[in-house]
Amino acid sequence: MAKNTDDLRQGRRQQAVVDAFDRRILAALAADSSQSYARLGEAVGLSAPAVHERVRRLRQSGTIKGVHAALDGAALGKPLLAFVHVEAAGWGKSERLMQVLQFPEVEEMHSVAGDASVLFKVRTASPQALEAFLAQIHAVPGVTGTRSYIALSTYLERPVQAGVTDSWPDMPLPE
């Protein structure tokens, strides 16, 4: 019998109301999370204690999930970035497939709509290491195929942004 894996994703806390000051604080923290509350306050036009209280509230609500160092894959010996679409019989998310998350090469795993069930973002040392990862995926019962997309260049890689586009342009971007 398949084990229920829905509890692997942490339950959401109550959504905090995020105002313009919060968004400016979040944008500044996303750019440099090592800033002091005083420096953040100067950047957003609030006192250090007010920023501290807002950051505390944003952490408590789960809006700020953590503080992380941005690591360079190539410098760590993992220059090959790939996106792996997994096709599976049924929904695809299984206990065995979830075990693949133990490999440090797996950066992200998403359940997706479309012709694939699951999408992995992986960073490996070489094409041979990617092949070994794919062998692990293909050994999972129910997996019927994969499609891998290898990134040749990365033009933008960033975390979630605090800003929101309030109105999209009526016309496409200029050529």
Image (tube, rainbow, N blue to C red):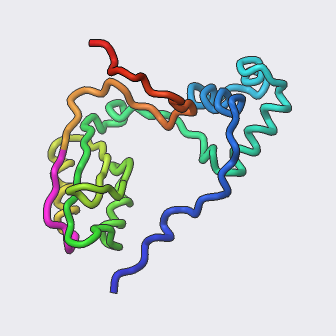
Snapshot quadrant of residue 54 = top right
Residue 66 screen position, x and y as percent: 60, 45
Residue 27 screen position, x and y as percent: 60, 28
The residue sitting at 18% across, 47% down in the picture is 148
- Give the vertical position of 133 relative to 45 (above or below): below
Quadrant (top left, top right, bottom left, bottom right) of the C terminus: top left
The residue sitting at 36% across, 54% down in the picture is 109
Q: Which residues are magenta?
A: 140-148
**Residue that sits furthest to the front in the current view:** 170
Quadrant (top left, top right, bottom left, bottom right) of the N terminus: bottom left
**Residue that sits furthest to the top in the current view:** 175
How many numbered circles are shown?
0
Q: For this rendering, which residue is in front, 175 or 101? A: 175
Look at the image and say whether residue 43 sits in the magenta stretch. no
Q: Is residue 91 left or right of residue 33?
A: left
Q: For this rendering, which residue is in front, 127 or 15? A: 15
The secondary structure making up most of the magenta span is: strand
The residue sitting at 70% across, 44% down in the picture is 17
The residue sitting at 55% across, 39% down in the picture is 68
Residue 23 screen position, x and y as percent: 64, 31
Look at the image and say whether residue 143 sits in the magenta stretch. yes
